[in-house]
Amino acid sequence: NNIKNTKKSSNSSKNEEIKKVVLYARISREKNHGGSDVSLDNQIASGRNWAQLNGYEVIAEYREVQSAKKVSNRPVFKKALELVKKEKCVLFLHSLSRGFRSTVNAIETASELEKSGSDLVSWNDKIDTTTPMGRFFYTLLNAVNQLDREQISHRTKEALDHKKTKTEKPGGR
């Protein structure tokens, strides 16, 4: 069971609620061959550090090796989101790119989290949706991330098209 008891007694007669966080880490593939993925262990470690620095209890850690553009194609991420919404806590990502591949998906998920009384923190991007400014920067940064992915895809397609006109084989061989 990934859920721990999250209440503790204080000196007063009232129980004090402890802030809770769920950590999610993802890499695209097991061996990255020089890519930019931060290891699963490093992503989880940054989440543990954030939780300790900010007074949160880690109630679950999810790790996923999956390359997918849609959240619906990532079963571990879906489980993490379900727990976050159920517990009304924070979803921690090392970076937004670990959770989302499109601005639309990121905004939809943030809206779902907000409706459930939950929040999102992205360590690398310094995003914390518990504040209005954090929500604004979250939306803006996702738009920039999507633009970057689309530009890379466009440049790759152009390069492949150019090689085809020169009768070169894709891959440079």
Image (cartoon, rainbow, N blue to C red):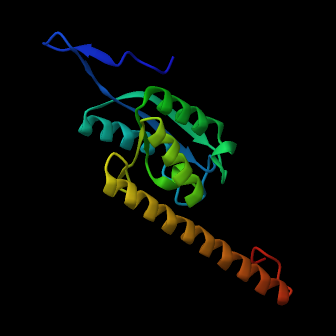
Quarter of the rendering containing residue 132:
bottom left
Asked whether, in this view, residue 95 is left or right of residue 10, the answer is right
Along the viewing direction, whichever of 5 and 114 lies nearer the viewer? 114
Q: Position of residue 172 (x, y in %)?
A: 75, 78
Q: Residue at x 83, y 78 (%)?
A: 169
In this view, the residue farthest toward the top is 13
Q: Position of residue 5 (x, y in %)?
A: 37, 15
| Relative height, residue 2 to residue 24 (above, below) | above
In this view, the residue farthest toward the bottom is 166
Along the viewing direction, whichever of 1 and 169 lies nearer the viewer? 1
Q: Position of residue 173 (x, y in %)?
A: 78, 77
Q: Residue at x 29, y 25 (%)?
A: 18
In this view, the residue farthest toward the left is 11
Q: Residue at x 48, y 52 (%)?
A: 38
Disc tally is 0
Q: Residue at x 79, y 82 (%)?
A: 161
Asked whether, in this view, residue 107 is left or right of residue 49, the answer is right
| Relative height, residue 8 to residue 145 (above, below) | above
Along the viewing direction, whichever of 35 and 99 lies nearer the viewer? 99
Q: Position of residue 108 (x, y in %)?
A: 56, 50
Q: Is residue 41 visible?
A: no
Q: Is residue 52 visible?
A: yes
Along the viewing direction, whichever of 58 and 134 lies nearer the viewer? 134
| Relative height, residue 9 to residue 57 (above, below) | above
In this view, the residue farthest toward the front is 115
